[in-house]
Image (cartoon, rainbow, N blue to C red):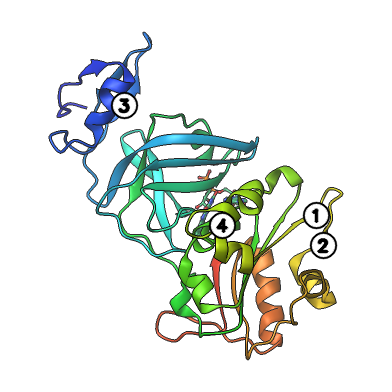
Amino acid sequence: MSDAPTPSAGTFSDILPKLSASEVPTGLLPVEGQDGVWHLASPTKEYGHLYPATVLTVHHWTDRLFSFTTTRDPGLRFENGQFAMIGIEVDGKPLLRAYSIASPNYADEMEFLSIAVPEGPLTSRLRHVKVGDTVLIGRKPTGTLLLDNLRPGRNLYFLSTGTGLAPFMSLIKDPDCYERFEHVILSHTVRISGELAYANHIRHELPEHEFLGEDVSGKLLYYPAVTREDFAVTERITKLIESGKIFTDLNIPELDPEHDRVMICGSPEMLADTEALLQARGFDEGNMSKPGAYVVEKAFAER
Ligand SMILES: Cc1cc2nc3c(=O)[nH]c(=O)nc-3n(C[C@H](O)[C@H](O)[C@H](O)COP(=O)(O)OP(=O)(O)OC[C@H]3O[C@@H](n4cnc5c(N)ncnc54)[C@H](O)[C@@H]3O)c2cc1C
């Protein structure tokens, strides 16, 4: 705090524009005083590998699941499907976790979909995030869920559970998906229907999108499943593939390593089961040096 620039005060809307102004040193955080007045405080040092982003919107899907958008540093580059380290400053140090970027790489804003773990060091705090708060975002996104890590093919499957949907929210807005594949199948499995984040957006808004609408309407097949409530589909993805139900429901051919490509992002258990199923069917894993028939990313790690 000692080498902090002198805080300036005002209403939040006075201060917000200054955050992106070049004369404001990086690391300034908007902090609301007890009097309801916002201050540009600087509790942070400068973290060269992180930029302070201002939260623009917050949406709570359930008490355990929320999403938020933030400002984007103009210098931040990433590929659709990648994750970044994000977090907040706690006791003068950044507390960071890996987060998939849910927005596409051409968007002006960043979007994240987050779990709220009651005792989780980051998310027990982050779940209270409000418009105008600051989160720290890593400048070097990375990850394996890249279109270039897959060989060309016929149908592209995005298989997700829980917050594993996030990287695919970015990818289903990538026009390259629709250029490279005949169909893009987005499977999202959750425990309760309230956790089907973005369902309405995928079903009703994306098909009307000015630029993506035609591709989405013609090629994107959304396949939600809910395991702990009554729902049209209630089984896990491995069962749905083994029984063939997903293919019958969507009227598409069975998974075939010759033709189809798969990206998986989910719980450690879902990843293990799905990878085993794919490997048994002859799918090979792709990576940066050698594209394959499938790629995998953890939605979270067990600690
Ligand atoms: C490559 C990668 C990408 C990730 N992307 C996201 C993302 O987009 N959104 C997101 O919310 N999290 C994501 N995570 C998990 C994230 O890094 C944190 O674990 C999560 O934010 C919880 O942080 P925490 O400090 O509160 O608790 P942690 O101490 O990190 O986790 C505590 C426990 O909570 C459970 N848990 C953690 N994350 C999740 C989750 N997402 N879903 C269900 N259970 C979970 C696990 O059992 C874990 O052991 C990702 C992790 C990895 C490795």
Name which residue type carries label 2: Glu
Measure how far apart labels 2 and 4 are at the Cα level.
Answer: 21 Å
Please say if 262 is above or below 32. Answer: below
- Does the beta carbon at disc 4 come under 8 Å from ligand 1? yes
Residues at discs 2 and 1 in contact (Cβ within 8 Å): yes
Name the residue carrying label 1: 227
The numbered mark, 2 or 1, whose residue comes first in the sequence reads: 1
Q: Neighbour class for label 2 at 10 Å: few (<14), some, many (≥20)?
A: some
Looking at the figure, which quarter contains the C terminus?
A: bottom right
Name the residue carrying label 3: 30
Name the residue carrying label 4: 300
Please give left or right for residue 105 compared with residue 6 in the image.
right
Name which residue type carries label 4: Phe
Name which residue type carries label 1: Thr
Q: Neighbour class for label 3 at 10 Å: few (<14), some, many (≥20)?
A: many
The numbered mark, 2 or 4, whose residue comes first in the sequence reads: 2
The numbered mark, 3 or 4, whose residue comes first in the sequence reads: 3
Q: How many marks?
A: 4
Residue 167 position, x and y percent, is 52, 60
- Does the beta carbon at disc 3 come under 8 Å from ligand 1? no
Residues at discs 2 and 4 in contact (Cβ within 8 Å): no
Q: At 57% across and 52% down in the image, what residue appears?
A: 208
Please say if 222 is above or below 134. Answer: below
The numbered mark, 3 or 1, whose residue comes first in the sequence reads: 3
Q: At 16% across and 33% down in the image, what residue appears?
A: 24
Residues at discs 4 and 1 in contact (Cβ within 8 Å): no
Name the residue carrying label 2: 235
